[in-house]
């Protein structure tokens, strides 16, 4: 389900934020991590806000890619070494989650 995958992206970042933040070596990495968490939270909120999301209208390849990227993120989290690869994967997951946010309705 669409909301589950987007929410999972956000929860991976939110629930592991302190550990991830401590692993960041530079202020730039810390900023990127914080920005990604905020973007994931926003995507989760926007997708959940939909009254009845029409998942048929969503690009299934993006959903699949998000699911796979989330799995990779969870795996990297289990054996977190260098934060760099995690940040790259997290950026991709957040990008995919944001791509699933519905376009604003015309006013």
Image: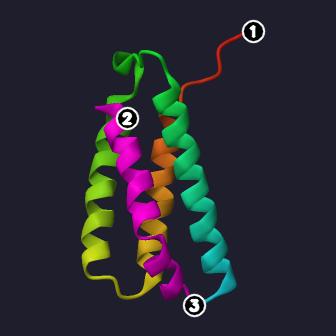
Q: The magenta stretch spans which residues?
A: 1-25
Disc 1/disc 2 C-alpha distance (Å): 25 Å
Residue appearing at x 28%, y 65% in the figure: 74
Q: Is residue 68 above or below residue 103?
A: below
Q: Mark 1 points at which residue?
A: 107
Which residue is at the front of the view, 101 or 85? 101
Placement of the C terminus among the 4 image quadrants: top right
Q: In this view, does 26 lie above or below 50?
A: below
Residue 97 percent location from the top left of the image? 46, 43
Disc 3/disc 2 C-alpha distance (Å): 32 Å
Q: Which residue lies furthest to the right in this view?
A: 107
Any mark on residue 29, and which?
Answer: none
Disc 3/disc 1 C-alpha distance (Å): 45 Å
Q: Mark 2 points at which residue?
A: 3
Residue appearing at x 30%, y 74% in the figure: 76
Residue 29 percent location from the top left of the image? 60, 78
Secondary structure mostly taken by the magenta-highlighted segment of the chain: helix
Q: Which of marks 3 and 1 is nearer the N terminus?
A: 3
Whether label 3 touches label 1, CB < 8 Å: no
Placement of the N terminus among the 4 image quadrants: top left
Within-10-Å neighbours for mark 3: few <14, some 14–19, many 20+: few
Q: Which of marks 3 and 2 is nearer the N terminus?
A: 2
Query: Is label 3 or label 2 in front?
Result: 2
Within-10-Å neighbours for mark 1: few <14, some 14–19, many 20+: few
Q: Mark 3 points at which residue?
A: 25
- Secondary element under disc 1, as helix, strand or loop, is loop
Residue 28 percent location from the top left of the image? 67, 79
Left or right relative to 34: residue 5: left
**Is 37 colored magenta in this rendering?**
no
Residue 46 percent location from the top left of the image? 55, 33
Residue appearing at x 35%, y 33% in the figure: 2
């Amino acid at each position: 389900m669409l909301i589950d995958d987007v929410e999972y992206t956000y929860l991976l970042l939110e629930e592991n934020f302190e550990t991830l933040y401590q692993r960041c070596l530079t202020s730039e990495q810390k900023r990127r991590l914080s920005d990604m968490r905020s973007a994931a939270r926003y995507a989760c909120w926007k997708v959940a806000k939909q009254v009845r999301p029409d998942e048929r209208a969503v690009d299934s390849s993006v959903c699949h890619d998000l699911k796979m990227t989330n799995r990779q993120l969870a795996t990297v989290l289990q054996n977190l070494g260098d934060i760099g690869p995690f940040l790259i994967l997290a950026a991709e997951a957040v990008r995919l989650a944001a791509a699933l946010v519905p376009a604003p309705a015309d006013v």
